[in-house]
């Protein structure tokens, strides 16, 4: 590999082009490794970022197009006769063909990120007689996304690209898959908006017919329970990783990427963002929430009770979590070093204060658009605050994640109990 890297430094664009084409022809070469190294050379100023990405896009498009036509012309006999030389057995072919039959050409977009799949999608597409017009767009979109992500990743990791590129690549793939699911959901909703509305309406009518006792608030209660259960499972997973001290690599990669790519002048600007986590701003936000609750006068005292219990009980809840984790650690892994700030107090406080305020304020709006957009913006805002804290404070990324998740569990547990109490009070009052 070092020999390849030495040649790469002398003929960077040509070697990058050749490596990507050869990998997509199913030769045992790691294109992601060389893209990461190209990103590192971009970081050093020895390669152009634009030309490096363009090289990967063109090479990826050519490579997968060649394999498409090889499969189209050679047919299934190509697999039977030569498949063993590139590790494309009939069994592997059947598995990939089954995936593509279910997902269509959409798999081509993300197949580049799946080792053992990207090498064969061109062959399988050609053999399965997918039309070239259907094939070409997702194939080139996938090549563009693949090149952009790994060149950018190498540039972001800088001199530590070799140390972190495998682990960071896994996190990148997970993030891309989550983004793909989100964008795919939006695209499907946009394309089939009326059909989905009609389908949901029919489903709702069916559910009402079958379960006439279920009201909107009870459906909402079930939704809260599902979210709470998901958060509890996540919380338990974080606790296990914390006790086994498995956050080291995540902390190193996250901290390095943020610190290496955040310029000094930006840090001066971002220092003001930390004021969004000040006690004074918390007080203003809580006061606004109290005023809205008072003016709306809908289950006023119950909502005041919810706000009081969540805010006053938060610190006791965190202390309980810390003591439980410390107690378990003392018996489980007494000699290992763990963070004393997990879950982070500032992150948990921010999640709880903003979370309960947004929840109570949204309860008093009937605008569906606001009810959808505000939670999404809140998630983006919390992510931005996490980045700022990692960049400007010595807080570990895992401690911030812990603060967010454990804080979410606390507020959703109280939301769930509050809704149950509200149902009981309304039924007693005959509402």
Image (spheres, helix red, strand yellow):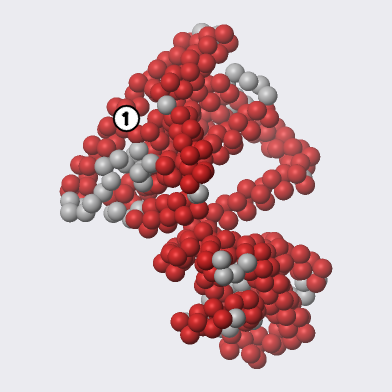
Q: Nearer the viewer, residue 143 or 236?
A: 143
x 50%, y 23%: residue: 357
Query: Residue 79 location in percent, x, y?
Result: 65, 85
Q: Is residue 109 visible?
A: yes
Query: Residue 303 location in percent, x, y?
Result: 48, 16
x 50%, y 79%: residue: 5
Looking at the image, is 428 positioned above or below residue 257?
above
Q: Horizontally, is 157 left or right of 203 in the view?
A: left
Q: Horizontally, is 426 left or right of 90 in the view?
A: left
Query: Residue 231 location in percent, x, y?
Result: 44, 40
Query: Residue 415 location in percent, x, y?
Result: 46, 26
Q: Nearer the viewer, residue 234 or 102?
A: 234
Q: Is residue 412 visible?
A: no
x 35%, y 21%: residue: 312
Quadrant in which residue 151 is drawn:
bottom right
* Quadrant showing the C terminus: top right
Q: Horizontally, is 60 left or right of 194 in the view?
A: left
x 48%, y 18%: residue: 284
Quadrant in which residue 295 is drawn:
top right
For disc 1, the neighbor class at 10 Å (few under 14, some 14 to 19, many from 20) is some
Looking at the image, is 249 positioned above or below residue 383?
below
Looking at the image, is 373 positioned above or below residue 215?
below
The residue carrying mark 1 is 317
Q: Nearer the viewer, residue 257 or 422?
A: 257
Disc 1, SS = helix
């Amino acid at each position: 590999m070092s020999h390849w890297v030495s040649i790469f430094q002398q003929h960077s664009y040509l070697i990058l082009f050749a490596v990507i084409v050869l990998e997509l022809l199913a030769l045992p070469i790691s294109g992601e490794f060389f893209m990461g190294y190209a990103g590192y050379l971009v970081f050093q100023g020895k390669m152009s970022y634009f030309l490096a990405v363009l090289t990967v896009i063109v090479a990826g498009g050519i490579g997968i197009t060649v394999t498409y036509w090889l499969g189209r012309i050679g047919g299934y006999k190509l697999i039977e006769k030569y498949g063993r030389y590139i590790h494309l057995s009939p069994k592997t072919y059947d598995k990939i063909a089954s995936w593509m039959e279910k997902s269509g050409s959409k798999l081509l977009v993300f197949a580049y990120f799946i080792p053992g799949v990207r090498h064969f999608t061109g062959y399988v597409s050609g053999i399965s007689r997918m039309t070239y017009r259907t094939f070409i767009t997702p194939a080139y979109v996938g090549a563009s996304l693949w090149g952009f992500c790994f060149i950018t990743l190498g540039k972001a990791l800088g001199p530590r690209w070799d140390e972190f590129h495998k682990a960071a690549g896994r996190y990148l793939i997970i993030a891309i898959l989550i983004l793909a699911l989100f964008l795919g959901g939006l695209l499907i909703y946009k394309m089939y908006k009326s059909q989905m509305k009609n389908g949901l309406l029919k489903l709702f009518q069916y559910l009402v017919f079958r379960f006439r006792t279920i009201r909107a608030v009870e459906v909402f209660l079930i939704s809260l329970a599902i979210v709470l259960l998901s958060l509890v499972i996540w919380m338990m997973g974080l606790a296990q990783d914390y006790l086994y001290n498995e956050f080291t690599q995540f902390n190193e990669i996250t901290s390095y990427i943020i610190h290496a790519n955040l310029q000094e002048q930006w840090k001066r600007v971002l220092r003001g963002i930390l004021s969004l986590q000040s006690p004074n701003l918390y007080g203003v936000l809580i006061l606004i929430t109290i005023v809205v609750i008072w003016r709306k006068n809908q289950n006023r005292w119950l909502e005041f009770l919810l706000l009081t219990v969540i805010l006053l009980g938060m610190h006791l809840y965190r202390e309980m979590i810390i003591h439980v984790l410390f107690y378990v650690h003392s018996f489980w892994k007494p000699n290992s070093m763990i963070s004393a700030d997990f879950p982070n107090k500032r992150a948990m406080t921010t999640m709880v204060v903003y979370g309960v305020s947004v929840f109570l304020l949204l309860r008093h709006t009937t605008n569906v658009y606001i009810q959808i957009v505000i939670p999404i913006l809140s998630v983006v805002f919390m992510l931005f605050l996490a980045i700022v804290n990692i960049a400007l404070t010595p807080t570990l990324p895992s401690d911030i994640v812990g603060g967010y998740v454990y804080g979410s569990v606390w507020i959703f547990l109280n939301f769930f109990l509050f809704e149950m109490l509200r149902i009981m009070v309304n039924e007693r009052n005959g509402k």
